[in-house]
Amino acid sequence: MPKVDQLAKLLEAVAAQNWAGARAIGVQIADVEEEKGHHSAAQLLRGALHPNGHRAHSTSSNGTWLGDPGLLTAALTRLQGAPLLEDIALRPVQRRELMTFVSEWRHRDALETRGIERRRKLLFHGPPGCGKSLTAHALGVALSLPTYVIRIDAVVGAYLGQTAMRIRELFHFAENTACILLLDEIDALGKRRGNQLDVGELDRVAISLMQELEHTRPKGVVVATSNLPQQLDEALFRRFDQVFEFPRPSRPELLSFGLKRARSGGIVSPRSVRRLLAAAPSYAEAVRCITAEERAVALRTMTRQA
């Protein structure tokens, strides 16, 4: 909570119609909340200071755009760990296309000198648990780029136009930062327009998202994922340079994946893998089942040794 003296100064500025002074005090209060780790509160305060969507941006000493630090802190999470693309369960056609993309990135300067535009925006769609987000992270490792996932809850705002403004901020970040910007579950922002049951603001958000995808030239790569491509606005698809489908794995694919995963752990037997994965619908569920079995076997072993 702001101190009484800050509130008093704020009210004095309002009473005197000193709007510049009131705004400056408001910024100070938001900065204090940010320093305390109250990122959502700081973000809400800054949004109230700029209800029309215009915000002050942070800049470095040389004038480079750095974005709104409060929003970037709240809305972006850097993924840790280092999954390798060769360890991801992919079908041959997917792997070939992704390796072509990696080669394209590595030769991007040569392509540019020939006037050839590299691909910058990808859409991964398919059922849950089939490796979309993990592949995006592994792609970042292959390109030697950090991967930042966008937190949708920090992007959607309560004020009219606030969500569109935050989307714009994040795409500006992508324009100035070499990274994988992962827009997980893009369905929340890019739903098909014209649904009479939705509020009009959702249509405006979808339009803003499409405009940013259309005009932004990321320094790295923007990757979006969707579990429900049939609910996405049709016009959204053409904003991506390439669309990858991640189909539900077949029984043989799941079994092959599970056996490889179990061999690397050296705890679960092939027979147990076949039993565990009899009804698994996805790679994520296969990992969950095998990990649970590894945990149970390890605990039984430790109990016997105790």
Image (cartoon, helix red, strand yellow):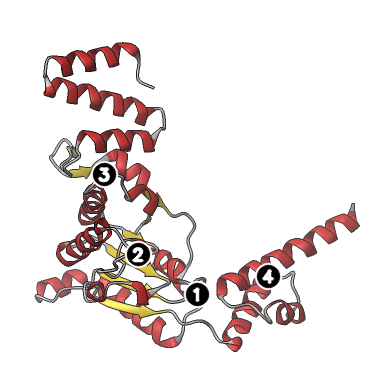
> Which sits in the foreground, 131 or 137?
131
| Label 3, label 2: how far apart the Cα atoms are | 20 Å
Residue position marked by numbered label 3 in the rendering: 159
Q: What amino acid does circle 4 point to?
A: Ile
| Label 4, label 3: how far apart the Cα atoms are | 45 Å
Q: Is residue 109 above or below residue 74?
A: below
Q: Which residue is found at the position 36% from the left and 28% from the top?
A: 33
Q: Nearer the viewer, mark 3 or mark 1?
A: 3
Q: Earlier in the sequence, mark 1 or mark 4?
A: 1
Point out residue 127 in the picture as x, y percentages from the top left corner. 47, 75
| Label 1, label 4: how far apart the Cα atoms are | 16 Å
Point out residue 180 in the picture as x, y percentages from the top left corner. 33, 61
Q: Earlier in the sequence, mark 2 or mark 1?
A: 1
Residue 108 visible in this rendered orientation of the protein: yes
| Label 2, label 1: how far apart the Cα atoms are | 16 Å
> Which sits in the foreground, 298 or 106?
298
> Which sits in the foreground, 198 or 115?
198
Residue position marked by numbered label 1 in the rendering: 130
Point out residue 62 in the picture as x, y percentages from the top left corner. 13, 39
Identify the image quadrant of residue 287: bottom right
> Which sits in the foreground, 57 or 10?
10
Q: Earlier in the sequence, mark 4 or mark 3?
A: 3
Q: Which residue is found at the position 30% from the left and 28% from the top?
A: 31
